[in-house]
Amino acid sequence: MSLDDRDGQAVPLDLILGPHQAATVLTRIATTFRQQDLLPEPVALRLACERATDGDPLVLAAPGQVWELRDGVDIDDAPAQRLQVHLRLTDPPMVVVGDPDDPTGDGELDELLIEVLEMYRLVSWDTRFLAPNPAAG
């Protein structure tokens, strides 16, 4: 298991999603690597596992997730203590996020470059937002 260089903590996808859905997510990431980067299947799967376990938002960020500020990151440098992802945009890679702890409940959303999530760690993922397995038809 790869450890995240930023805080020494691996992202426990199997605990966040459950083992079956974690495997499905990793397979989809690997498939994307195979298709976009023309990587052999074993290399794509290894890369998918490493980057997902490292908490790389470029491969993980998706609607239904909550990301929490990493230990050691100054809250003054971040948009909020926690961010909830509502939408992922691709060009450039961005996310539409809200503060799940906003006491006003006004639902204000912001567009952020996906790199902002590098200050955060994935803490939950609402599985209702996971797309059905395309192979399942």
Image (cartoon, grey):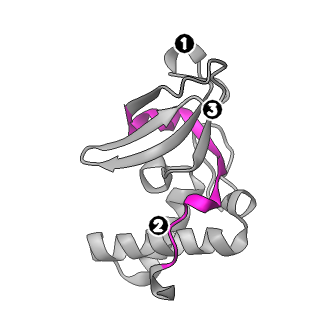
Q: Which percent across, then down, holds residue 51?
A: 50, 57
**Residue sitting at x 61%, y 24%:** 105
Amino acid under label 3? Answer: Pro
Label 2 sits on residue: 47
- From this view, report whether residue 117 is shown above or below residue 71: below
Instruction: Identify the magenta region.
Output: 112-133
For mark 3, does the 10 Å Cα neighbourhood hold few (<14), some (14 to 19), or many (20 or more) residues?
A: some
Q: How many marks?
A: 3
Are there few (<14), some (14-19), or many (20+) residues within 10 Å of tag 1? few
Residue under pointer 3: 100
Outermost residue to the front: 106
Q: Earlier in the sequence, mark 1 or mark 2?
A: 2
Instruction: Please tell me whether residue 130 belongs to the stretch shown in magenta.
Output: yes
Residue 13 appears at what percent x and percent y? 66, 60
Q: Nearer the viewer, mark 2 or mark 3?
A: 3
N-terminal of the pair, mark 2 or mark 3, is 2
- Going by the image, does 74 lie left or right of 39? right
The correct choice, above or below, for 42 with respect to 16 in the image is: below
Is residue 51 found inside the magenta-colored segment of the image?
Answer: no
Foreground: 3 or 76? 76
> What residue sits right under mark 1 in the picture?
76
Q: Residue at x 54, y 68 (%)?
A: 25
Q: Secondary structure at mark 2?
A: helix
Tell me which amino acid carries mark 1: Asp
| Distance in Å between CA atoms under marks 1 and 3 | 18 Å
